[in-house]
Amino acid sequence: MTQPTIPRPMISLQSVSKRFGSFVAVDAATFDIAPGEFFSLLGPSGCGKTTLLRMIGGFERQSEGDILIDGESMGIRPPNQRPTNMVFQSYAIFPHLDIAENIAYGLVNRDLDKATIAKKVAQALEMVRLEGLGNRRTNQISGGQRQRVALARAIVCEPKVLLLDEPLGALDKKLREEMQIELRQLQKSLGITFIFVTHDQEEALSLSDRIAVMARGKVLQIDTATSLYERPNCREVAGFIGNMNFFEGRIASIANGVAAVEIGPGQHVRVSAGSGSAPGQAAIVAVRPEKIDAGATQPQGNGAATANVIKARALAGSYLGDRSLVLAEWREGTAPISVSLQNRKTLATASPGSIAGTDSVATGAPIWITWPIEAGVLLNS
Amino acid sequence: METIRKHLNLLSLFAVLYLAFLYVPVLLLPLFSFNDNIYVTLPFKGFTLKWYSNLLANSGLQSALWASVKVGVGVAVFSTFLGLLAARAMTRYRLPFRRSLYALIMLPLVIPYMVIGVSTLVILRRGFDMDLSLWTVGASHVLITVPLSMLVLMARMEGFDRSLEEASRDLGDTAWRSFRRVTLPLVMPGIVSSLLLCFITSFDEYLLAFFLAGSEATLPIFIFSSLRFPSKIPDVLALGSLILMVSIVLVVFAEWLRRRGVSGSDSSVI
């Protein structure tokens, strides 16, 4: 994987691996994180994202490789000697201390006088909007407030890097969305590098400057949210983030940077091809459901020349309010194509035969699936 | 409805009888300790404090009490210390042979004290040619109380989130400071429970003390030997009442400590 090199990275992972017995939890992770970046580690549970985070924080010792923070090798330094702080998944609020004592916990280890500590704690409480709650006991505050205490307790130590282990996982949906916005604003205003572990792709896409997608201990792709979604580099990333239709086949020809992929006997779809592709290769064409259009009549005119057209049979349609989902079978024995249609038309303007809701998709009726050539992505199979 | 109510009444009756069975004998002890009669029988003959004043004069009893307190306190502190180390090792580290080690430490709980007593006696006298003393009694009591202590403390250590200790390291604590600032305060209720449990176990243990005590008797041994002399029994009642009072104060104090230490969300064991 080639990455644009970052001139002075805040974090530099150099083939960092972690093995538990014969199980490889993290496999030679190598990448850089820029100062002030909001960087997410995204993947299904058990993909090694938390283990990687814990190695950066010093809670797990890497089996191989080294981690550099701000140019300094961390080696096997314990957590208390690293310029990182962590917001734990369980928040790990000390139950025997009150809120202010929790926030002051790390400051007590510094050479600071009492007045300075009190001032910093007050500032931190203000920053996470918990003014006046310093004397509360930890069981007297809500989940969202506990989350903020954990955040304040870490940030008050002014780390170079803040590590966040699924910090919003325990909150309900509404609170989580509020905290996402707050987290992002906080990160912007402080300028601290954030490394954020999550299995929630929407959360990762909306918050992060860049995202590393992981699976089975491997880093599959590191990119911005848009690039990950629009230009996934492999089937796994494409399938993990959002929904994706896959057409497996073989490259028949390449002309002017456009490959024709044979996906069935005599059936070709066209897709933009990179320099690495050659005729004869097995390949997968991936298309997002919302990039596909579906109609009850065969498309005519010049639109058809720059688009892929597949004739299919409607299997099912479901009306979801803002959009409709249509499943269409284009060949027996392959996964049906899923099409997401925006319901832009009103009932009055919807033309007869158009698919604006479930009732207009008759099961078994023929429909025409079309998408522009540039909407597809060519993946190695 | 009717049958349910009937069942409830039977259940409450059972509960009352059960509690009476448990506690009435214990409550009779202080009552008879004020009775002006050398025999422990009804009806009460009159109020007296002479058994309590007898206690002050009974030097044998006093030295036995003192011996038991010394052994009990020593055993409680030492066993709890060992129990704390063992519990930490069991809950925080991946030990080889963890289960076997655990079983080995727990074993004295299920071996009859008689067997432990005899075998320890043989080994100490024949094997090491040691004189019997309160030390040998204490050693055997440590053997039987370490598993108790470890059980109590393991439950306590497993009961709190491990990331609390990690968080303290993350916030700049060394391993030792983290233990002092986080682990110890959170385990404290368990430590208090363990100290009490070990002390009480040692304090009224008879069999091992009987085998392993030298010339100095512990309290249970002294009491058992007193039972042969009817005139000594009221003294024992007075002493029992005092011990009962001290135990109640201790238990209330421990409970108060526990509630004060960790309130609400984090409930303690025992």
Image (cartoon, coloured by chain):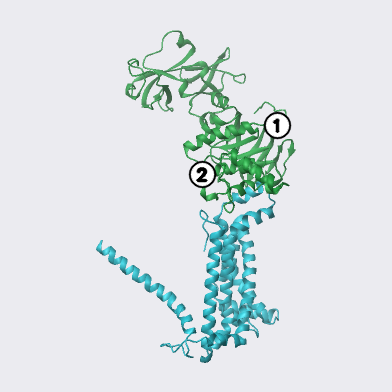
For image coordinates 43% across by 87% down, the residue present is: B44
Figure colour of chain B:
cyan
State which tag comes first along the sequence, 2 or 1.
Answer: 1
Is residue B199 at all visible to an observer of this figure?
Answer: yes
Residue that extends furthest to the top in the rendered view of this protein: A301
The green one among the chains is: A
Residue tagged 2? A143
Residue that extends furthest to the right in the rendered view of this protein: A72
Q: Could you classify mark 1 by the number of other residues whose Cα lies within 10 Å: few (under 14), some (14-19), or many (20 or more)?
A: some
Residue A71 is marked as none
**Front residue of this view, candidates B42 and B211:** B42
Residue A9 is marked as 1
Report x, y in % for residue A8: 72, 30
- Compared with A135, B102 (above or below) is below
Identity, as a three-letter code, of the amino acid under mark 2: Gly
**Front residue of this view, candidates B182 and A255:** B182
**Front residue of this view, candidates A74 and B106:** A74
- Compared with A267, A183 (above or below) is below
Could you tell me how far apart the alpha carbons at marks 2 and 1 are, in whole angstroms?
A: 34 Å
Report x, y in % for residue A249: 51, 23
Report x, y in % for residue B233: 51, 88
**Front residue of this view, candidates A334 and B18:** B18
Q: Which of the chains bears the disc numbered 2?
A: A
Is residue B96 at all visible to an observer of this figure?
Answer: no
Q: Secondary structure at mark 1?
A: loop
Identity, as a three-letter code, of the amino acid under mark 1: Pro
Q: Secondary structure at mark 2?
A: helix
Report x, y in % for residue A248: 50, 25
For image coordinates 54% across by 63% down, the residue present is: B256
